[in-house]
Image (spheres, rainbow, N blue to C red):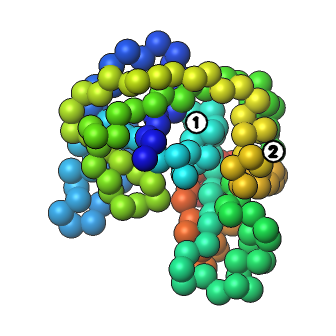
């Protein structure tokens, strides 16, 4: 199992646990997820973070409950789809982010879309700079779809697909 943390900062020597910037409503007994933690993502889901930090995006993939017709409609032959607003495309093409590999034994699995957390400080084992982010999706069998607005996708949360929305507060006309 390989775990990663993505950042625009190329000089992180130690990851210190810190609370999330904007707390989320968490299920009863999981409120601690807003507290001081170091977050990581597994290699199967790393495409969720191949974006500039503040880039709003919606990511979808099939679940075991997704009917074949719905899977074909939304995914075609791709294993997942990443939706992004058109005005972010230039930044996807131009910016560089850094993928830090994390020691898996320091983390606990949240059993939620590849997310892992550590309650202790973590020293990364490797850092790789990634440029031309727009070219990173297809090799992972993820289609990057560029839209004028993410707003028409609000209904995706009523499908049987897994849907993750990240930084949607930064999307145009989301509210």
Q: Which residue is mark 2?
A: 86
Identity of the residue drawn at 30% across and 60% down: 26
Q: CA separation, marks 1 and 2?
A: 14 Å
Vertically, is 160 above or below 163? below
As helix, strand or loop, the secondary structure at mark 1 comes to loop
User: Is residue 61 rendered to the left or right of residue 101?
Assistant: right
- In front: 155, or 129? 129
Identity of the residue drawn at 63% across and 64% down: 60
Residue 30: mark: none
Vertically, is 129 above or below 154? above
Counting labels gives 2
Residue 54: mark: 1
Q: Where does the image place residue 111, in percent across and percent down from the top left? A: 36, 61
Give the residue at the far left of this rendering.
29
Mark 1 near mark 2, Cβ–Cβ under 8 Å?
A: no
Q: Residues within 10 Å of mark 1 (few under 14, many from 20)?
A: few
Q: Residues within 10 Å of mark 2 (few under 14, many from 20)?
A: some
Residue 149 visible? The answer is no
As helix, strand or loop, the secondary structure at mark 2 comes to helix
Q: Where does the image place residue 33, in percent across and percent down from the top left? A: 27, 50
User: Is residue 56 rendered to the left or right of residue 101?
Assistant: right
Residue 62 visible? The answer is yes
Vertically, is 149 above or below 159? above
Identity of the residue drawn at 57% across and 65% down: 163
Q: Looking at the image, is mark 1 or mark 2 earlier in the sequence? A: 1
Which corner quadrant holds the C terminus?
A: bottom right
Q: Where does the image place residue 142, in percent across and percent down from the top left? A: 71, 54
- In front: 154, or 70? 70
Q: Where does the image place residue 166, in percent across and percent down from the top left? A: 54, 50
């Amino acid at each position: 199992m390989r775990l990663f943390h993505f950042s625009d900062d190329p000089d992180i020597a130690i990851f210190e646990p810190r609370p999330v910037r904007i707390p989320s409503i968490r299920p009863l007994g999981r409120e601690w997820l807003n507290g001081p933690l170091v977050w990581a993502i597994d290699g199967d889901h790393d495409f969720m973070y191949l974006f500039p930090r503040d880039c709003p995006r919606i990511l979808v993939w099939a679940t075991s409950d997704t009917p074949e017709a719905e899977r074909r409609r939304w995914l075609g032959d791709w294993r997942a789809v990443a939706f992004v607003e058109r005005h972010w495309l230039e930044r996807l093409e131009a910016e560089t982010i850094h993928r830090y590999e994390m020691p898996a034994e320091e983390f606990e699995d949240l059993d939620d879309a590849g997310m892992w957390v550590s309650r202790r400080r973590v020293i990364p084992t490797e850092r790789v700079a990634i440029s031309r982010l727009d070219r990173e999706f297809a090799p992972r069998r993820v289609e990057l779809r560029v839209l004028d607005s993410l707003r028409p996708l609000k209904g995706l949360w009523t499908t049987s697909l897994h849907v993750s929305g990240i930084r949607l507060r930064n999307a145009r006309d989301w509210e």
